[in-house]
Amino acid sequence: MSAPTYDHDDPSNGYEEPEETQLRLKLGVRPTWYRDGKHDHPHARPCPTWCCHADRPGGHDIESDHPMTPEHSLGIAVDTVASHYVGDREKVGDGWVVNTARLSADLQQLGDGEPQVQVALHHYVEGRHRCEERLRLSIEDARDLMTALRYVIELADDQR
């Protein structure tokens, strides 16, 4: 059985002593370190098509709390105004900008697990930004919530 080949099998990689790299290669064990976003992660399955790294095969986000399982995400959350929460005002150049509170919807998936819809509330308390994860939903849960929201919105629209 031959040892797996990683981009960082060079004994002068700077993360291991050359003897450590040579022994690891001889034994055929995986490295204990990976470069975030590089092509040397052992999780060989491609990212979901919606993942911000889908165009970089093997270029996964790696988090320290689950280093052997890549994290997939949209990369840019979809923000909407949350008008019943406090915003903030800041000086930008010669004028002022008012930031509204907002809800951020994101899609995330850990490894080959089920995708999850995450909703966070960004608001301001005494001028300080707060980000609170409010919802973590399965796709089915999110569809049910979407149906319930559509229903109550239609009821409210009928009363106008």
Image: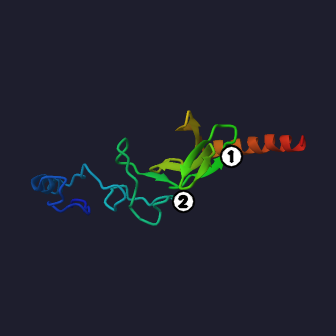
Q: Nearer the viewer, residue 73 or 19?
A: 73
Q: Which quarter of the rendered picture does the N terminus lie within? A: bottom left
Mark 1 crowdedness (10 Å alpha carbons): few <14, some 14-19, many ≥20:
few
Secondary structure at numbered mark 2: loop
Residue under pointer 1: 143
**Badge 2 amino acid:** Trp
- Looking at the picture, the colour scheme in use is rainbow
Q: Is residue 88 above or below residue 51?
A: above
Residue 24: x and y in percent read 17, 53
86 displayed left or right of 159: left
Q: Is residue 117 visible?
A: no
Residue 158 placement, left or right of 113: right
Query: Which residue extends farthest right?
Result: 159
Q: Is residue 42 above or below residue 67?
A: below
The earlier-in-sequence mark between 2 and 1 is 2
Q: Nearer the viewer, residue 115 or 62?
A: 62
* Percent position of residue 127, x then y: 55, 37
Q: Position of residue 140 (x, y in %)?
A: 64, 45
User: Which x, y percent locates residue 45?
Assistant: 42, 59
Q: CA distance from mark 2 to mark 1?
A: 18 Å
Residue 14 shown left or right of residue 119 in the figure? left
Question: Which quarter of the figure is the C terminus placed in?
Answer: top right
Taking the spot 49% from the left edge, 47% from the top edge, the residue there is 113
The residue at 63%/37% (across/down) is 86
Seen in the picture, residue 139 relative to 37 is either above or below; the reply is above
Amino acid type at image mark 1: Arg
Image point 11% across, 56% down: which residue?
A: 18
Which residue corresponds to mark 2?
A: 50
- Label 2 close to label 1 by CB (< 8 Å): no
Residue 66 figure quarter: top left
Q: Is residue 97 left or right of residue 58?
A: right
Instruction: Name the outermost residue toward the front.
Output: 94
